[in-house]
Image (spheres, helix red, strand yellow):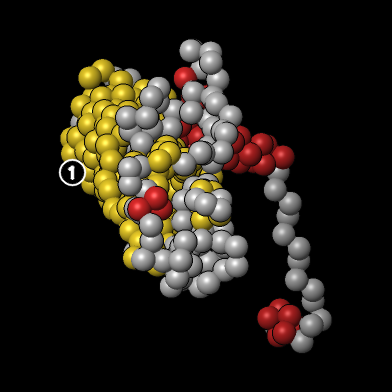
Amino acid sequence: MFARQLLMGRHPIPAPAPLAGPCLDVIGKLLIGIGVVALVQGRALAADLPNPVPPAVAAPAAVPPVNWSGPYIGIGLGGRANAVDANVTSATVGTPPTPIPLPPVSGGTTFALAFWQQNESAMQYLDHIAIHGSFFGGWNVQVAPAYVIGIEADLGWGHEKAVFHGSPYPTNLQFGTPSTPFGASPNDTLGVRTTWDGSVRLRGGWLATPSVMFYLTGGLTVAHLDVTSTCSTTPTPNVSNCAPGNYFSGTLAPAVISHSATKLGWTAGVGVDMWLWSHWMVRMHYRYSDFGYLSIGDGGAFSFTDTRSCTGCAAAVNPLNVSYQLRMMQHFFEIGLAYKF
């Protein structure tokens, strides 16, 4: 009967009695104890685990020290500047030879210690500059951690040509009866051309860093020179030349005289070599070469003598002999790339 009344909603469901206060205290303390035990056990377990090992870092590869000792070869490219001072040293005409007066030339310094000015005078300056290329090779020996010595040779080429218009020689000559200028026209020329050169030198270097070397160098050098004297074949009033019948009623020949010579001189320079990477290095240098220019005396200068003969002339004006001298200095400015074996 009670169940029927309950289903029909006539009797409410009685609410559960609240838990007593002592039970809640016991449950709370139990939960706190469980949490403390879990925390302690977790820390103990963490203490028992091994410490994490940091990942190993690879040591940097050792850089091999730069070794300057050994052979090397390379190529260079830059500029070569020539300064050529030309002078007539003697001139005679006729049989027997009669000296031809030469124009006065101011002399060099008389101060003996200023050797570079002993030969500063010249009748004509034939200067030029051109692109210059070279092949070089050598052998270095590193004698101390900061010092290197060695030997080097090079062979270079450049095409430089300077031409003086107005005479077949470095100065105008005037002679004969009546006194007549010789070859004083724009078609009369003296041309100087330089081509190949080379040197053999010692080197001494100081290592500013293991891969940068500053060096001094000096030794022997050679240079090849061509010179051409052209006597005009075009008749010019009041001027004697190689035109038919225009040399004291005769004809002077040959009209063109050429000479070639290779001369030995001295050279000195400075430079720097720098390593780029394994086996390769780059260089920059300046070098001076002298052929009788700064030297005391003229032993290193280029010297030539021309003889022209006349057909149909009197003995007094036949032949014409002219000797002249070319003192030369060369300046080299170059960068290069070399491979060390």
In this view of the protein, which residue sits in the foreground, 296 or 206?
296
Q: Is residue 252 above or below residue 221?
A: below
Relative image position of residue 92 (x, y in whole percent)? 40, 43
Q: Secondary structure at mark 1?
A: loop
Q: Classify residue 122 as left or right of residue 4.
A: left
In this view of the protein, which residue sits in the foreground, 93 or 89?
93
Q: Which residue is mark 1?
A: 341
Placement of the C terminus among the 4 image quadrants: top left
Q: Is residue 30 above or below residue 156?
A: above
Name the residue type under label 1: Phe
In this view of the protein, which residue sits in the foreground, 337 or 193?
193
Which residue occupies 74% across, 51% down? 18
Relative image position of residue 324 (x, y in whole percent)? 40, 43
Q: Classify residue 140 as left or right of residue 266.
A: left
Q: Is residue 110 above or below residue 128?
A: above
Relative image position of residue 98 (x, y in whole percent)? 40, 41
Which residue occupies 60% across, 41% down? 27
**Res. 120 visible in picture:** yes
Determine the image quadrant of residue 91. Answer: top left
Determine the image quadrant of residue 48. Answer: top left
Determine the image quadrant of residue 2. Answer: bottom right
Relative image position of residue 145 (x, y in whole percent)? 29, 19
Which residue occupies 51% across, 38% down? 101
User: Circle 1: is it few (<14), some (14-19), or many (20+) Cα within 10 Å?
Assistant: few
Which residue occupies 33% across, 42% down? 96
**Res. 267 visible in picture:** no
